[in-house]
Amino acid sequence: MEYSDRIKLRRAHKRVEALKGFYKHLLIYCIVNLALFIVRGNILQFFQSETPDKNFIAWIDWNILIVPVFWGIWLLFHAAKVFSYKLKFIENWEKRQMEKFLNEQ
């Protein structure tokens, strides 16, 4: 195996590992947030029966709802990093289209 083939193989392996990492992250995100929404009602009922403070219950409710939002933002950054090669493809396509239209004029 030549040096360039080994480099290509290493890059392909690195790319596959990045994709696997992203899909694991996405799976965990879905499972945890599904569990949070399922358990949310039980948690709120528990605290409503234990503490009469409405502000505390609202705080717990917002915290349970905020987790998927901020984690989702982080997941989007992860996706952008993993799938950044598509952005390069779009850039190249835009350059080719610009050159094509400039050559027509």
Image (cartoon, helix red, strand yellow):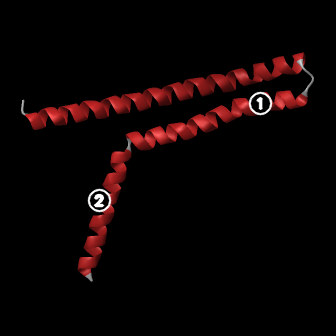
Please tell me how many numbered marks the rendered image carries: 2
What residue did someone put label 1 on?
61
- Apparent side of residue 71 relative to residue 53 in the rendered image (left or right): left
Identified at 9% across, 34% down, the residue is 3
Q: Residue furthest bottom?
A: 105
Q: Please tell me whether mark 2 sits on a helix, a strand or a loop.
A: helix
The one of 27 and 10 positioned closer to us in this rendering: 10
Identified at 62% across, 26% down, the residue is 34
- In the picture, the disc for residue 92 is 2
Q: Classify residue 57 by image quadrant.
A: top right
Q: Classify residue 7 by image quadrant.
A: top left
Which amino acid type corresponds to the residue marked 1 in the rendered image?
Answer: Asp
Note whether 40 is above or below 73 in the view shown. above
- Apparent side of residue 82 relative to residue 51 in the rendered image (left or right): left
Note whether 93 is above or below 4 in the view shown. below
Q: Earlier in the sequence, mark 1 or mark 2?
A: 1
* Image coords of residue 17 (percent x, y): 33, 29
* Image coords of residue 44 (percent x, y): 80, 23
Q: Classify residue 16 by image quadrant.
A: top left
- Apparent side of residue 54 relative to residue 14 in the rendered image (left or right): right
- Apparent side of residue 36 relative to residue 54 in the rendered image (left or right): left
Q: In which quarter of the image is the N terminus?
A: top left
Q: Residue furthest left?
A: 2
Q: In which quarter of the image is the C terminus?
A: bottom left
Determine whether label 1 and label 2 are within 8 Å by CB. Answer: no
- In the picture, the disc for residue 22 is none
Identified at 84% across, 19% down, the residue is 47
* Image coords of residue 49 (percent x, y): 89, 17
